Amino acid sequence: MEIKIKDLTMAYGDTKIFDKLNLTLQSGKTTCLLGESGCGKTTLLNLLAGTLTAQSGTIQPQTFGHVSFVFQDSLLLPWMNVLDNVAYLMDDRLTRKERHERAGHLIQRVGLEGYEKHYPTELSGGMSRRVTLARALGKEASLLLMDEPFSSLDDGLKDRLVILLKELLEEEKKTVLYVTHDKRIATELSDHVLLMVREEGLSRIIRDEF
């Protein structure tokens, strides 16, 4: 799914964030949005997710309901085991058996085979992030939004998860917007890198490749 953002204007009260922002996310590609904290990256993700509404402009096609989101925190459901957490966002039209088969495959792909019956409190931070990735990929969503999902991890684990994520995205062929302030991750992971800054009271994209 190609996503076209046209003339998007967004403000919180009297504070304008975007003024006629334009951006295209290429179908099946990973775009990384690089920028410092507070420059508007997360606001853009929330607009795409449908949790915020812009004052004007369009997002085509409408992405609400067709989005999977990976946050900075894992947000796993503590009363569900790994298998049920991964299956939780899958299409209700699938049978329980079909959801569990799909979840089992994804758990295997993220290297957690044998942990299906474990609960979130029994997992390390890195394992929890792997479960979160599997859950996000299990949802039938054309657009995957990722907000600094590896920010609190040490560099070694972060590097391993970036490699894993890149492999998974090559298989799944989803359209991805990944926001980060880490230039190294952006260049390693993405097909396309954008740089967002906040200047003169507005957030805008000033470079589209580097």
Image (cartoon, rainbow, N blue to C red):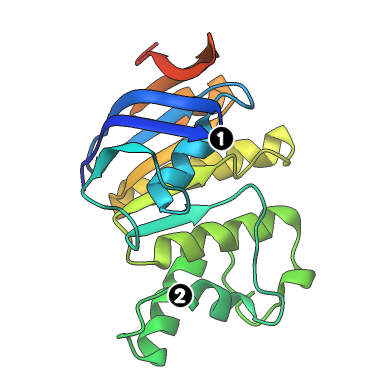
Q: CA distance from mark 1 to mark 2?
A: 42 Å
Crowd band around label 2 with a 10 angstrom C-alpha radius: few (<14), some (14–19), many (20+): many
Please give the name of the residue rendered at 35% of the width and 91% of the height, measured from the top-left corner. Answer: 95
Rendered image quadrant of residue 68: bottom left
Q: Is residue 99 left or right of residue 183?
A: left
Q: Residue 150 — which label?
A: none
Amino acid type indicated by mark 2? Ala
Crowd band around label 1 with a 10 angstrom C-alpha radius: few (<14), some (14–19), many (20+): few
Q: Earlier in the sequence, mark 1 or mark 2?
A: 1
Q: Which percent across, then down, holds residue 54?
A: 39, 41
Please give the name of the residue rendered at 46% of the width and 23% of the height, measured from the top-left corner. Answer: 187
Q: Is residue 67 above or below residue 187?
A: below
Q: Is residue 130 left or right of residue 25?
A: right
- Whether residue 182 is visible to the viewer of this picture, yes or no, is yes
* Residue that sits furthest to the right in the current view: 121
SS at mark 2? helix
Q: Is residue 131 above or below residue 99?
A: above
Residue bearing mark 1: 13
Q: Is residue 12 above or below residue 68?
A: above
Q: Residue 103 — which label?
A: 2
Q: Nearer the viewer, residue 14 or 149?
A: 14
- Whether residue 111 is visible to the viewer of this picture, yes or no, is no
> Which tag is nearer the camera, tag 1 or tag 2?
1
SS at mark 1? loop
Please give the name of the residue rendered at 35% of the width and 14% of the height, measured from the top-left corner. Answer: 209
Please give the name of the residue rendered at 50% of the width and 26% of the height, measured from the top-left corner. Answer: 16
**Marks 2 and 1: in contact by CB < 8 Å?**
no
